[in-house]
Image (cartoon, rainbow, N blue to C red):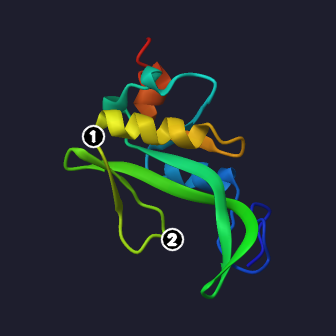
Amino acid sequence: MVTPHKKSMLGNGNYDVNVIMAALQTKGYEAVWWDKRRDVSAIALTNVMGFIMNLPSSLCWGPLKLPLKRQHWICVREVGGAYYNLDSKLKMPEWIGGESELRKFLKHHLRGKNCELLLVVPEEVEARQSWRADV
């Protein structure tokens, strides 16, 4: 199916951010774009449900890793007191650790020029901007 938000006609799930934002809104959440020039210590982690990152990913053809990159969406979420990378390309969720390890993980990826970060927050958190630690 071809939609205005689909970036590929191959049916590979390559959607733009508007699809993600609309899907979150149907569940009572908002996606807040994080200005990567800011330090991630300014994020009030307790008010954030999860993180969605768009970052470069290697393109594979079967077992062959091609020297090409394309953007890929990953999700990071806290489960049972630890944060996990829930990238669909992984065989299983990847343990990141606690808050300090999460901040290091985010900083590491945000240094890349083609990485973007969205904070997934409940609508009321977005309305009050209480995802910001400096508010």
Relative to 104, residue 26 above or below: below
Q: Is residue 93 left or right of residue 135?
A: left
Q: Quadrant of the C terminus?
A: top left
Q: Quadrant of the N terminus?
A: bottom right
Task: Of the two numbered discs 1 and 2 on the same chain, state the one appearing first in sequence.
Answer: 2
Query: What residue is at 70 percent from the left and 79 percent from the top?
Result: 11
Disc 2, SS: loop
Relative to 45, residue 102 above or below: below
Disc assigned to residue 25:
none
Crowding at dot 2, Cα within 10 Å, few <14 / some 14-19 / many 20+, comes out as few
* The furthest residue to the bottom: 62
Disc 1, SS: loop
- The image position of residue 86, as x and y in percent, is 41, 60
Q: Nearer the viewer, residue 2 or 67?
A: 67
Query: What residue is at 37 percent from the left and 42 percent from the top?
Result: 49
Disc assigned to residue 98:
1
User: For the residue marked with disc 1, what is the amino acid?
Assistant: Gly
Relative to 48, residue 2 above or below: below
* Label 1 to label 2: alpha-carbon separation: 22 Å
User: For the residue marked with disc 2, what is the amino acid?
Assistant: Lys
Query: What residue is at 65 percent from the left and 45 percent from the top?
Result: 115
- The image position of residue 85, as x and y in percent, is 41, 56
Q: Is residue 84 left or right of residue 21?
A: left
Picture quadrant of residue 9: bottom right
What residue is shown with label 2? 89
